[in-house]
Structures are given as C-alpha cells and as structure tokens.
Amino acid sequence: MFGLLKQSIIGRAILSGALDFEAVDIRDYSLDKHKKCDDMPYGGGSGMVMTVQPIVSATRAIDPQNRMRKIYLSPRGRVFNNTIAKELAKEDGLLLLCGHYEGVDQRALDICGYEELSIGDYVLTGGELAAMVVIDAVSRFVDGVLGSDASSEEESFSDTLGGLLEYPHYTRPAEFEGHKVPDVLLSGHHAQIKKWRMEKAKKITEKMRGE
Ligand code: 21W
C-alpha cells in the first residue's frame, strides 16, 4: 500500500534525499509461534484488539533511542490539519502506528508514548490510508520536497490570507464554448488581480465554510 507514495512528488523527494520512509510489518515482531498480533477484548465486545507485545517490540526496534515522535492513527485522535502537518515536518522522525480491528491495547500507547491523530470524522477500515495522508501532507513542508516554484510561494500567500480557501484558477484558452476567462486576469494589472483573487477567496470561503 505504501508503495503508492514512492511515486510523484514524494518519490522524487526520496530520490533526492530530502526524506525517506519505511513500512514495517508488526507481525515480524510477534513472539507468538503463529505471529499472532490480535486477541479478544477484555470486558467483552465485538472485534479484536491488537496486542501489546508486538507493538512495544516493534516501536523499540524502530526507535531504540526514543527520538521519534510517536503517532497512533486513530478515529478518536486530534483532527489532523495543515498546522499540525507543519509542526510534524520539523521533527527528525515520525513513527506512525496504523491500527487495525477495533483498536490497540491501551498499554502499548501508554508505554511507548503515542499521541493520537485522526484525519477526519468518517470511518476507514484501517489506519494505513490515514498514515499515507499524513505522510503526504507533512512531506510538503519538509525542506527540498516541493522546490522553490510557484507552489511553495502560493503556500506562503495562502498563509497571509489567514486560512481563506483558494480563488478560482484559469488557463488558456481565454474562451471555451463561450465561457470566458474574467477580463481582469488578462489585464496584466497585478494590483487589481490580487484584489480580485482576494475577493473571490473570501466569497468562496463564505460559501463553502460559512454558516
Ligand atoms: C475504524 C478503527 C473504527 C477502529 C467505539 C468502539 C485511523 C481513522 C483510522 C477503525 C474503529 C483515522 C467503535 C479517520 C478513521 C482508523 C479504522 C472502531 C468502532 N467505536 N481517521 N468501537 N477515520 N480507522 N469503531 O477511521 O484506523 S486515523
């Protein structure tokens, strides 16, 4: 599953040495003769719970010096956003634990010091896709990943817009099936273009996120 990330921007960043990641199979750390990593929940209930031993062993093997920020992807976690992504990009390393089944034994989280992160209020079948979302969003803030083109410029621009959503974009042709690009964008008048984009950004933010 994580092979997907080795393509495109993140893949190029890995090749350039700006970042790297590795997927670890928790089953490799199970001391059980059948590599079992789940068991029935104490107190009853449906579904299975990931056991404490493989998680603690894997965590210690991956980060013996305990230097990495430990994050458990969980539907009950703090909701991930771009502010958190920026913050995580400053870390030397992240250890992302993907849950499966109903959840993981709470002691594994407590012993290893995992914080919990959700990517939004909808239910996935596991934490892997959530981890990939976090890796992708965090990588954009790692030096040398995006390059110094328009994209990173736009990032600082949107920062100054104070959380407004993006204005509409247009490219050639100037007219398609009678639908014209707004005149101001063809005018070359940079101050007016900036003002127009700001107004559009405010309008679209109100429409999509307003009361
Ligand atoms: C879904 C795990 C449901 C556990 C109360 C008691 C990681 C995720 C996940 C999953 C349950 C994220 C229940 C947004 C997500 C993830 C799999 C338990 C039943 N409730 N961000 N038992 N959405 N999801 N639910 O699903 O692992 S980050």
Image (cartoon, helix red, strand yellow):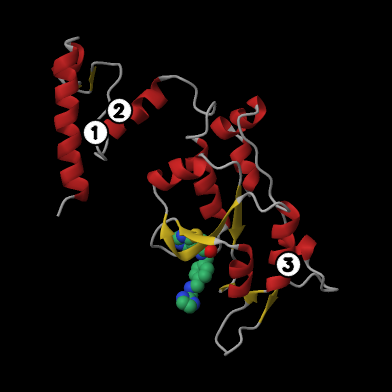
Residue depicted at x 45% and y 43%: 87
Q: Is residue 120 above or below residue 188?
A: below
Q: Left of 13 or right of it: where is 83?
A: left
Mark 2 and mark 3: span between their CA atoms?
A: 45 Å
* Front residue of this view, candidates 4 and 144: 144
Q: Is residue 124 visible?
A: no
Classed neighbour count for the residue bearing mark 2: other residues with Cα under 10 Å, few (<14), some (14–19), many (≥20): few
**Quadrant, the C terminus:** bottom left
Q: Which residue is mark 2?
A: 157
Name which residue type carries label 3: Pro
Q: Which residue is mark 1?
A: 161
SS at circle 3 = helix
Mark before the other along the chain sequence, 1 or 3: 3
Mark 1 and mark 3: span between their CA atoms?
A: 46 Å
Q: Residue furthest right?
A: 33
The disc placed on residue 54 is 3
Name which residue type carries label 2: Phe
> Do the residues under discs 2 and 1 have CB atoms within 8 angstroms?
yes
> Do the residues under discs 2 and 3 have CB atoms within 8 angstroms?
no
SS at circle 1 = loop
Q: Is residue 182 above or below residue 131?
A: above
Mark 2 and mark 1: span between their CA atoms?
A: 6 Å
Q: Is residue 23 above or below residue 14?
A: below
Residue depicted at x 24% and y 33%: 161
Q: Quadrant of residue 154?
A: top left
Residue depicted at x 21% and y 49%: 209
| Residue 71: % across, % down | 55, 56
Q: Is residue 149 above or below residue 101?
A: above
Q: How many numbered marks have been drawn onto this rendered protein structure?
A: 3
